[in-house]
Amino acid sequence: MLKVKLLKYTPDPDRLVAAAARLCYSPVGIDQILEQISLEKVQQLLNLIKESGHESPIEHVSFSFGVEGISRALSHQLVRHRIASFSQQSQRYVKLENFDVVIPPSIQNKPEVANKFAEALDKIGNIYQEMLKAGIPPEDARFILPNACETKIIITMNARSLLHFFEIRTCARAQWEIRRLALEMRKQVKEIAPLIFALSGPTCETLGYCREGKMSCGRAPSLADLMRNYQKSSN
């Protein structure tokens, strides 16, 4: 079962990002950088950096999550997000005596397939245990373990990376498991930094168009479609 816990985060993140933006656009000194920043001013500064595309101030805050109950198939997707830190439970050092698995709903919903899936997992588990008993080191025995194996991981990202993560992974076309994770992470950070993450999610929700091109679900027009319509209206 998926479990996501926001372990640590930069205190008062909205205010810190606003202070960083303020430093960029005003002559204020370091000693005064956090003074007299009202909630209204914080909102104005965050709107300014979003509208200008000057998003580097958002990188000054970060969030660390503890995550359990995800599959190795999901964790392999996480490494595609470059500006982040990951600490994952090792299959090299941790012997999985009775490993738990994540079963996709599409398999669970078909009993005849789910039974075969369960049988295959039991067989893999038995062979894994036989290899350990035969003296095969865990780092080699793990080669037989499936992507369905549950794993635990700590994820740390700065807010700018999280915004990109939410843009890609809360999309309706994202793989179901990582989308579920991204939605829960977004829910938790919005409680801590509501202004930073006010507009976070797929571009169909935040910008009104889709960047998926031919892979679009059709919920919103593609950027190419918008450009073609604009050119037609301009002629």
Image (cartoon, rainbow, N blue to C red):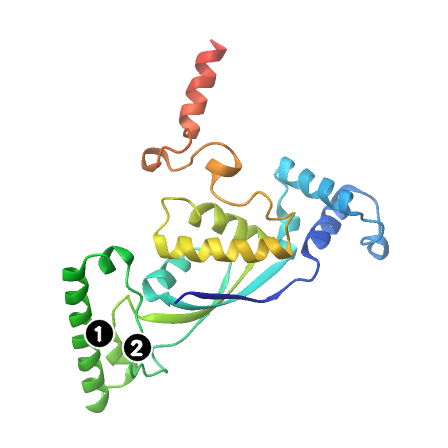
Relative to 186, does residue 201 appear above or below in the rendering?
above
Please state the horizontal and vertical placement of residue 202, each as a whole percent of the image: 47, 42
Mark 2: amino acid: Phe
Mark 2 lies on a secondary structure that is loop
**Residue sitting at x 69%, y 52%:** 14
In the figure, is residue 218 to the left or right of 48? left
| Residue corresponding to mark 1 | 144
Which of the pair 99/112 is nearer the observer?
112
Residue 158 in sight: no
**Residue sitting at x 66%, y 62%:** 10
Relative to 81, does residue 51 appear above or below in the rendering?
above
Q: Which numbered disc, 1 or 2, marks the residue closer to the eye? A: 2
- Any mark on residue 136, and which? none
Around disc 1, counting alpha carbons within 10 Å, would you say few (fewer than 14), some (14 to 19), or many (20 or more)?
Answer: few
Name which quarter of the figure residue 158 lies in: bottom right
**Residue sitting at x 62%, y 53%:** 59
**Residue sitting at x 36%, y 34%:** 213
| Residue corresponding to mark 2 | 99
Mark 1: amino acid: Ile
In the figure, is residue 61 to the left or right of 20? left
Between the residue at mark 1 and the residue at mark 2, the CA separation in whole angstroms equals 12 Å
